[in-house]
Image: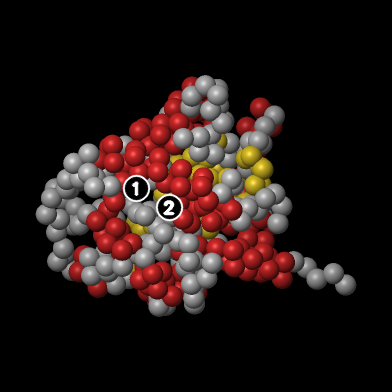
């Protein structure tokens, strides 16, 4: 596997661990992946949920928790660390400012176009900015607008295809359409980015994500021009993943038929492991009582059938009676819980086995 360079950051393995919320990828998982030479990513969404004053002081609790998690990850490793901050979060600006002030290496940002992200950079900041997009058009818009308003170009892009877990940047009818497959989208994004690379004599790597699970998958997509890959689902069934053992076991116990597309309260389709909770939602049996905080810009608590954050927090803790697990399309492949080191060693071995044999 070739080294991945994002600006002046040299990443030994071109593997980024996807940011998974709520509470799935925190300092434990991120630190372990970064220690092995990849990029470890902390998911910032509702990260303050374990703070005692979370319900009363939503903003302060999240800022405090993000600082703690970045610092804890830094105690584990001197490797490259990132934070995933969704544009759809109502506290997006505060979380971005916090991550930059803590000296995070990379901010990954999706669930909307992060049009004003470069505006948060401070003098002397070395934080790299990597938008998550689902089309070449989105990449072009961000490059154009960032250059026009901030004289700044994205340091890289993550192209997330329709096989990813969690919220998806596609319409429901596009998810199984071959025209929107990751392999189809990748050349378009690379081509759009190439224009800006050549015009401004810079490098903007494109990192592929969504449905990539094995080392052979990594080789295949990198042969198509991706500079690196982002994997989320593969790292859930690791010892260091911050979710409960029950959450990890839900992946191991799942079958391909259990991978389900749901309509999320935030107005986007999402991929999850089907269970009784989701069945209840589909039957119209679940209704929210109240919302002590408005964490997502697109959530209307008056009409939403349930609280997405509460459901994800419950699942993270192993309470599937009141929640469900987001998962990528290949989650059912997992058979056991192993360490991050063993996972990465397996990916490297699978990658090498996919190389053409020398005669």
User: Is 142 rendered above or below residue 257?
Assistant: above
Pointer 1 and pointer 2: residues touching (CB < 8 Å)?
Answer: yes
Q: Earlier in the sequence, mark 1 or mark 2?
A: 2
Query: Are there few (<14), some (14-19), or many (20+) residues within 10 Å of tag 1?
Result: many
User: Is 179 rendered above or below residue 346?
Assistant: above
- Which residue carries the number 2 mark? 26
Q: CA distance from mark 1 to mark 2?
A: 8 Å
Q: Nearer the viewer, residue 240 or 141?
A: 240
Q: Nearer the viewer, residue 285 or 93?
A: 93
**Number of numbered discs present?**
2
Q: Position of residue 221 (x, y in %)?
A: 63, 58
- The quarter of the rendered structure image containing the C terminus is bottom right
Q: At 26% from the left edge and 43% from the top edge, which residue is drawn?
A: 295
Q: At 22% from the left edge and 44% from the top edge, which residue is drawn?
A: 53
Q: Callout 2: helix, strand or loop?
A: loop
Q: Quadrant of residue 245?
A: bottom left
- Which residue carries the number 1 mark? 47
Q: Is residue 248 left or right of residue 299?
A: right
Q: Is residue 289 left or right of residue 331?
A: left
Q: Position of residue 242 (x, y in %)?
A: 41, 59
User: Is 113 rendered above or below residue 73?
Assistant: above
State the mark number for residue 253: none
Q: Callout 1: helix, strand or loop?
A: helix
Query: Are there few (<14), some (14-19), or many (20+) residues within 10 Å of tag 2?
Result: many
Q: Nearer the viewer, residue 180 or 105?
A: 105
């Amino acid at each position: 596997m070739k080294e991945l360079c994002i600006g002046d950051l040299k990443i030994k393995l071109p593997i980024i661990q996807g940011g998974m919320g709520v509470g799935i990828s925190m300092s434990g998982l991120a630190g372990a992946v970064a220690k092995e030479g990849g990029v470890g990513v902390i998911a910032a969404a509702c990260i303050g949920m374990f703070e005692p004053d979370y319900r009363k002081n939503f903003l302060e609790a999240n800022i405090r928790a993000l600082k703690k998690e970045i610092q804890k990850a830094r105690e584990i490793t001197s490797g490259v660390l990132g934070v995933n901050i969704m544009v759809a979060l109502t506290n997006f600006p505060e979380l971005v400012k916090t991550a930059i002030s803590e000296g995070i290496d990379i901010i990954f940002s999706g669930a909307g176009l992060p049009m004003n992200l470069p505006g948060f950079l401070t003098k002397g900041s070395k934080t790299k900015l990597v938008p998550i997009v689902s089309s070449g058009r989105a990449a072009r818009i961000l490059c154009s607008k960032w250059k026009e308003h901030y004289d700044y170009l994205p340091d890289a892009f993550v192209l997330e295809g329709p096989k990813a877990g969690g919220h998806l940047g596609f319409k429901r009818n596009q998810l199984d359409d071959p025209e929107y497959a990751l392999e189809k989208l990748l050349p378009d994004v690379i081509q759009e980015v190439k224009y800006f690379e050549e015009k401004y004599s810079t490098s903007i790597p494109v990192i592929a994500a969504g449905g990539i699970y094995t080392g052979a998958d990594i080789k295949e997509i990198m042969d198509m021009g991706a500079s690196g890959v982002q994997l989320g689902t593969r790292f859930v069934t690791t010892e260091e993943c911050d979710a409960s053992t029950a959450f990890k076991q839900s992946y191991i116990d799942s079958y391909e038929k259990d991978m389900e597309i749901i309509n999320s309260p935030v107005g986007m389709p999402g991929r999850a492991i089907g269970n009784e909770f989701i069945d209840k939602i589909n039957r119209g049996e679940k209704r929210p009582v109240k919302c002590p905080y408005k964490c997502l810009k697109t959530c209307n608590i008056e009409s939403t059938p349930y609280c997405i954050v509460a459901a994800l927090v419950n699942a993270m803790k192993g309470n599937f009676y009141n929640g469900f697990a987001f998962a990528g399309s290949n989650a059912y492949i997992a058979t056991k819980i192993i360490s991050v080191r063993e996972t990465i060693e397996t990916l490297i071995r699978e990658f090498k086995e996919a190389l053409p044999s020398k005669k």
